[in-house]
Image (cartoon, rainbow, N blue to C red):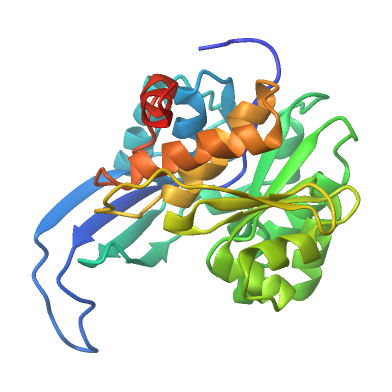
Amino acid sequence: MPTSGPRLLCCDTVLVDVVLSVPRIPERAGDVRAADQLVTTGGGFNAMSAAARFGRRVAYAGLLGTGPFADLAAADLAREGIEAPLERVRDLDTGICVVLVEPDAERTFVTAAGAESRVRPRDLDALAVGPGDVVLVSGYNVMYPGEAEVYLDWLSGLGEGVVVAFDPATRIADVPAPHLEAALARADWLLCNASEARALSGEADPSVAASSLARPGLAIVVRDGPRGCVVALRPGGAVAVGPSPVEAIDTNGAGDVHNGVFLAELLAGTPAVAAARWANAAAALAVTRRGPATGPTRTEAEALLGG
């Protein structure tokens, strides 16, 4: 794993996922029995591990806590060669996310925040982000009062040589409009799924949505599940990038894998459309495996692409 050179810095918070495979979401006051269970590091770890497995230098731009969940997360970050440069919070454990996965591979989240929600301006300043670095920011980073302002102020002060990628995440409707506008104003890339692109643009077709959202200084990737993705480097310039067909068993974390691999390839100098092909292949392999952080190695993705 590289120990010098440009980094992918991920602001998306690291949590511990408690993943349960259920026949259905229970009704209020109901009960269902899970067929499988998995306790694993998730959240921002999904994108970071995917990028690290593609050979890039990766750092967690967030906080770990102190406790059993934090210890699990720290061990997983270390195993993947992901840097965790910030001092751990001493009096609070890392948060958790309960993930309910249904038979059609759809997932539902219930999150309890922990130490990752306590980030301060001096924490982010200590990261010493410089030209050539890529920063991945999530809608979760700019959603909650207090935490959102810290991240947005920091982003606004990053130099022009720093590439910022913004993924609004599945709760885009909960991001305050001023926060969303501020994140997009600094972003160089908007990475979103088809539902989020529709919410932002009013366009149901991913290609039309990507074309309408792109503008000078802001390029777009719209992930479209089993249909691949769309890349728009300029208004009206959408390019559809075809999928790598597989049989999905768990979609949890697939979008994060796509983001991580796409940005890893950009860091390597790969043109955007080619980077999207790698990202499609990696996400396809990820959904054939249970759990959130199931991104493949570059060699495995290359085999799927036939290269």
**Residue 225 to residue 8: above or below:** below
Q: Position of residue 270 (x, y in %)?
A: 67, 25
Of residues 69 and 291, the one nearer the viewer is 291
Residue at image coords 88%, 42%? 157
Of residues 51 and 247, the one nearer the viewer is 247
Of residues 252 and 129, the one nearer the viewer is 252
Q: Position of residue 306 (x, y in %)?
A: 40, 26
Image quarter of the C terminus: top left
Q: Report the number of discs.
A: 0
Q: Position of residue 24 (x, y in %)?
A: 19, 76
Residue at image coords 61%, 28%? 265
Q: Is residue 66 left or right of residue 258?
A: left
**Residue 304 to residue 94: above or below:** above
Observer able to see residue 146: no
**Residue 3 to residue 69: above or below:** above
Residue 188, quarter of picture: top right
Of residues 131 and 122, the one nearer the viewer is 131
Q: Position of residue 302 (x, y in %)?
A: 43, 24
Residue at image coords 67%, 29%? 266
